[in-house]
Amino acid sequence: MTNETFTIAIDGPAAAGKGTLSRLIAERYGYHHLDTGLTYRATAKALLDAGLPLDDEAVAEKIAREVELAGLDRDILSKHEIGEAASRIAVMPAVRRALVEAQRRFSAKAPGTVLDGRDIGTVVCPDAPVKLYVTASPEVRARRRYDEILGKGLTADFDAIFEDVKRRDERDMGRADSPLKPADDAHLLDTSEMSIEAAFQAAQSIIDAVLSRNA
């Protein structure tokens, strides 16, 4: 981090609301936003598109170093098969190192940046002046994902989504490299019973307090 930029690190499990919250915060403060999960998905998509193996760490690292962080398309990258492939390469230390380097470069953009993911406050930007850990109960997160799919006119199985949420939590929190956990100095936002507006107001109060101290 430089004196010319202000970084907000937002971590949390899937479907806790951190993506929506991050975009709202970036828009409110005029900061650059990066969903770091999309960097892993973009790497996975590039491997799939080129017909390359998903179990070759050296190949995956090379592709990860070529990923362009500008213009990552959430709609394309949110496809299930890309997510499955991303989860396979995300456990590779060399891939994580390559993408963390790119994410850190992004975090230095002026006037400020908002990065959301699983290891922003703990690994990518441990010196960020604001760290938020956004969470919600597995049941609430599964229900949100279920409602989101139905809202798109698609069919969904709540029980299968609930099991998938719990599986992802176990994988993210249990991995040896950069496990999902709150940074020691992170502010906890449990959105289980909060609207996105209430979560945004809580986050804004935290950010404004730090900005005023740093002014």
Image (cartoon, rainbow, N blue to C red):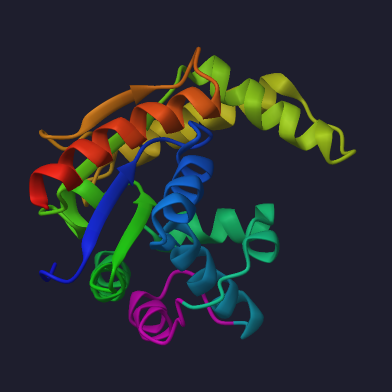
Most foreground residue, 137 or 52: 137
Residue 63 sits above or below residue 2 on the image: below
Number of numbered discs on residues = 0
Which residue is at 31% across, 73% downward?
106
- In the picture, measured across the screen, residue 209 lies left or right of residue 205, that is left
Q: Quadrant of the N terminus?
A: bottom left
Residue 5: x and y, percent? 21, 67
Which residue is at 39% across, 78% downward?
64
Would residue 108 be visible to someone looking at this image?
A: yes
Residue 53: x and y, percent? 52, 76
Q: Name the residue furthest top.
A: 193
Most foreground residue, 88 or 44: 44
Residue 103: x and y, percent? 30, 69
Residue 138, magenta (yes or no)? no
Q: Name the residue furthest right.
A: 153
Residue 44 sits above or below residue 49 on the image: above
Residue 8: x and y, percent? 27, 51
Would residue 91 be visible to someone looking at this image?
A: no
Over which residues does the magenta segment extend?
52-69
Which residue is at 35% across, 84% downward?
65
Residue 68, magenta (yes or no)? yes
- In the picture, measured across the screen, residue 15 lies left or right of residue 209, that is right
Quadrant in the rendering for residue 61: bottom left
Most foreground residue, 117 or 167: 117
Which residue is at 77% across, 36% downward?
149
